[in-house]
Amino acid sequence: MSARQYLLILILAFSSLWTNAQYQISGQVTDESGNPIEGVDVFIHETHVGVLTDVNGKFTIESVKKGHYHLHVTFAGYHAEQRDIDVTESVTGLQFVLEESINELHEVIIENSLEKQDLKNNPLQVIHLDEHFLKQQGGTSLMTNLEKIPGIGSLNNGVGVSKPSLRGLNGNRVVVTTDGIKQEGQQWGSDHGLEVDVNNADKIEIIKGASALVYGSDAVAGVINIRPVLPKGKDQFTAGQHVSFNSLNNAKRSSTFIAANKGGKWFKLRYSFLSAGDYSVPSNSFVYQSTILPIYANRLKNTAVKEHVVNAYAGVSKNWGYWYARASYYYQQSGFFSGAFGVPSIGILQHDGDFNNIDLPYQDVNHLNLSTHANILINSNWLEIDAGYQQNNRGRSGQTAFWGFWSD
């Protein structure tokens, strides 16, 4: 496509933002007894614009352009509802009756950018996980949390280094995406784990089977889509912190975030930190090629890990759609058990008494991820844009790797 054609598409896209007529979507949300529910989150999936119901359970979303929309209705303690709406004029009098759920946040609806799917009537093998499930697992990495799901495993090399395995396949047979951008760093060796902050994975969609091939030939085993929760609605401020401790390796994890939305302009910032010591095991020996070797003090020497992750988002959500940019920096220093590389010896396995230091062999990982995302309404059609840039610098025991290729 020539530069002139690109320019024409951009002109048509932006001109359509001001030429379409504007309508409104309104209605009421009640429970099964007919009582109005206040504070229900009603938002449009395509624009990230939404409102909360008032004391009478009523809501009104203003300045909606002509087009096809996916409306979500969610409230803690009730089953989520969704509805497709074609807006050719103002849509009023919508009625939503929410059924009470025994489990809080019982249903989580996740949609990919390729197509909107009715999850209840779709035969695809899709598993949905929410933030609550992930925090309950308490693993030191994302994959140690997911491997408890049937059919999903992980390849671990050290405490903080793990990569997905679906149906026995891994590496470039499994696709992992963050915000729709493919993670390129985990496809190479067994020590190339996922450069993903487990605390920033608010929603995860796992697709297995032939349906995953819509993501390309690399997805022959399956797809893991990682999606953070972005601010929606208007004029809100949220902040939170999650702290956890694991006695098995004295792991201390902390994650703090702040997010704000003012008039459809929003940002989200998260910083996560992990420090873990040598892993404790209920054994004092292991077998390597028919030779019994000792494990001193029941601790696997040099399996400590340190991790720092920053995720920053900034965007705008309006009636024409949304646009946002993401910048993520991931740093990890992790040691490898002395038997992971080469032939271990009793002298190498001798513990130095410090269970938190990182000795040779070890690796440093610096992963930069920049991406931009947009969903723009153009004459009742949606233009979706996902673009990203990644740089992965990995050094191991004095060697440096760029994009997975080792060089001295």
Image (tube, rainbow, N blue to C red):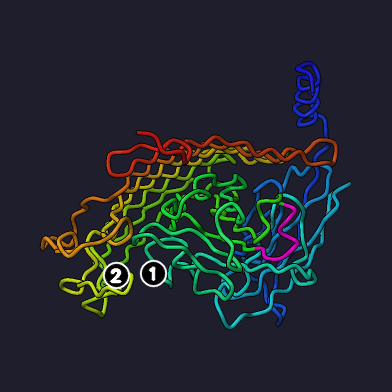
CB under 8 Å between discs 2 and 1: yes
At a point 50% along the width and 57% down the height, the residue shown is: 201
Residue 303 is drawn in which quadrant? bottom left
Viewer-nearest residue: 157 or 225 = 157
Residue type at the position of mark 1: Gly
Query: In this figure, which residue is indicated by the disc labeled 2?
Result: 246
- Mark found first going from the N terminus, 2 or 1: 1
> Residue at the top extreme?
4
Query: In this figure, which residue is indicated by the disc labeled 1?
Result: 138
At a point 14% along the width and 64% down the height, the residue shown is: 350
Disc marking residue 268: none
**Relative to residue 152, is residue 63 drawn left or right?**
right
Viewer-nearest residue: 44 or 91 = 44
Whole-percent x and y of residue 143? 47, 63
Residue 397 is drawn in which quadrant? top left
For the magenta stretch, what is the residue range? 207-214
Disc 2 versus disc 1: distance between alpha carbons? 8 Å
Q: Quadrant of the N terminus?
A: top right
Whole-percent x and y of residue 37? 63, 70
Neighbor class of circle 1 (other Cα within 10 Å; few <14, some 14-19, many 20+) is some
Was residue 265 drawn as part of the magenta stretch in this picture? no
Neighbor class of circle 2 (other Cα within 10 Å; few <14, some 14-19, many 20+) is few
